[in-house]
Image (spheres, rainbow, N blue to C red):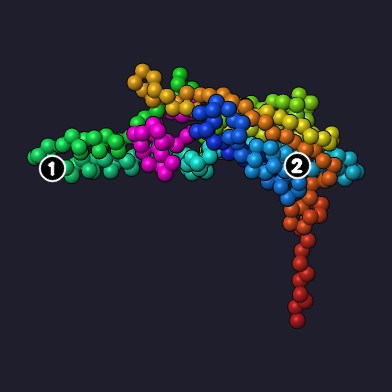
Amino acid sequence: MAQQHGIIVLFDVENALRTRSLDGNTYWFDNMKLFGSSGVGTEQLVTIVPGTHFLDGSQATEQVLNWLPAALGSIPPTVPRNYLAEQERADDRRTLNELASLNTEDGVSDTDLKRLQRRVGKRAGKQGGGRGLTAAKLLDVTGKTTSSSAAYNYPAPVITDITGEAVTEKIMYPAQYGSPDMIYDGWYWAATVDTSRPGVYPYTVHVQLHELVEQNDEMVWQSVDMTCTSSLKIINDPKRNGFTGAGVGALPLPAVPAVR
């Protein structure tokens, strides 16, 4: 079975959109630090990819990479996909209940109306339509609806392509896959890695961020395409069991005391 490498990329979306660059605005992590990955938590991550071997000792090509992007400081992408809709409905219920409790004989004051309008929040759609980011209320980083465009929750970054030397040299074969996963719109990027050619190979991740802009009196998410880089380091060492440090195989069983 292939060994799975998870690579998490955290994006400082707000600063990246302000500077129009991902330089200094990405933080890379993988699950191979124990085996020699360097630069974990920085933008200079070099992911170790140990070789896998057949029974005859020859190096095999059975390693798999998975990329998981996320926005730094935003609502975690691991919350249920219906979280936004539930927050909207809860906010509408609170607003309607408060409106019903107002003194109808005296009417509704301007102050009350403005307060309720702020609670209703703003809606934002995606520029030109397209997949994902359907029109929905803006949430702040605490998950509450907001009418302020100055502090809102950014959508998760979207990987659109993976290129670079590691791809052109046929060290890895990236592709976008559909799955039942309900975090990333059912799509994710993965790659198989050829471990038969040790060395360091850089690659480029193409990312789409989304910026909230006002167009024709409407709030829309406008896509902004950027790139960032990382590297793979293919080594001759075979993959090892993380618990025992030995080769991959059956875990050793503790001795069973004799029954008297």
Q: Residue at x 73, y 44 (%)?
A: 37
Boundaries of the magenta span: 131-155
Is residue 151 among what the camera can see? yes
Rounded to the nearest angstrom, the CA distance separating label 1 from label 2 is 67 Å
Is residue 175 among what the camera can see? no
Q: Residue at x 48, y 40 (%)?
A: 74
Q: Does the segment drawn in magenta span residue 60?
A: no
Q: Amino acid at mark 2?
A: Ile
- Residue 199's mark? none
Q: Residue at x 79, y 50 (%)?
A: 240
Q: Earlier in the sequence, mark 1 or mark 2?
A: 2
Quadrant position of the N terminus in the picture: top right
Q: In the rendered view, would you say 169 is above or below 94?
A: above
Q: Does the segment drawn in magenta span residue 135?
A: yes
In the rendered image, which residue does mark 2 sit on? 48
Give left or right: position of 144 versus 7. left
| Nearest the eye: 253 or 52 | 52
Percent of width and height locating residue 73: 50, 41
